[in-house]
Image: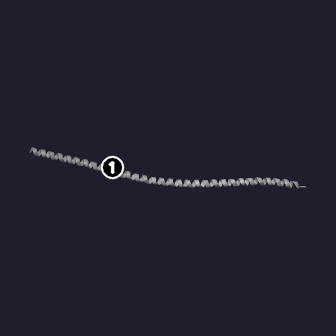
């Protein structure tokens, strides 16, 4: 019976070792599932960030377009202002000439008074 007890003990130890190995494999499987879940979450977050980056790029492009339009409008306003200034200078010069002509006319009319 001693050899049967030895075999029984060895079988029990083998079953215990198989159970322990099964528990280890179960723990490994749970760890793999957790890692896969975390990878999925990271992937989802990365996709969200990529979408946000695209939105930011589109917003920057829109702001750039608005800035270019504003710069063009500013240049047009500056050109119009320069034209108005030139017209005002011409009008001022014409006013000065008219003022001088008026003085000369008054002098001439003053000579003919009796």
Q: What quarter of the picture does the N terminus occupy?
A: top left
Residue tagged 1: 35
- Name the image colouring: one colour
Q: Residue furthest left?
A: 1
Question: Could you tell me which secondary element the residue under label 1 belongs to?
Answer: helix
Q: From the viewer's perspective, is 64 left or right of 14?
A: right
Q: From the viewer's perspective, is 2 left or right of 102?
A: left
Q: What quarter of the picture does the C terminus occupy?
A: bottom right
How far across and down, in percent of the image, does residue 98 sit? 78, 55
- Total number of numbered labels? 1
> Foreground: 52 or 71?
71
Q: From the viewer's perspective, is 45 left or right of 76?
A: left
Q: Residue at x 13, y 46 (%)?
A: 7
Q: Residue at x 45, y 52 (%)?
A: 53
Residue 68 lies in quadrant = bottom right
Dot 1: within a 10 Å radius of its alpha carbon, few (fewer than 14), some, or many (20 or more) residues? few
> Foreground: 13 or 80?
80
How far across and down, in percent of the image, does residue 45 sit? 40, 52
How far across and down, in percent of the image, does residue 14 sit? 18, 47
Q: Residue at x 85, y 53 (%)?
A: 107
How far across and down, in percent of the image, does residue 73 sit? 60, 55
Q: Residue at x 20, y 48 (%)?
A: 18
Residue 112 lies in quadrant = bottom right
């Amino acid at each position: 019976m001693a050899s049967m007890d030895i075999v029984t003990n060895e079988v029990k130890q083998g079953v215990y070792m198989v159970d322990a190995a099964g528990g280890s494999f179960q723990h490994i499987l749970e760890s793999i599932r957790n890692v896969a879940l975390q990878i999925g979450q990271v992937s989802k977050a990365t996709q969200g960030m990529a979408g946000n980056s695209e939105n930011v790029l589109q917003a920057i492009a829109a702001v750039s377009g608005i800035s270019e339009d504003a710069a063009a409008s500013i240049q047009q306003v500056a050109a119009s202002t320069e034209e108005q200034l030139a017209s005002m200078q011409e009008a001022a010069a014409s006013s000065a000439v008219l003022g001088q002509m008026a003085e000369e006319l008054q002098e001439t009319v003053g000579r003919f008074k009796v």
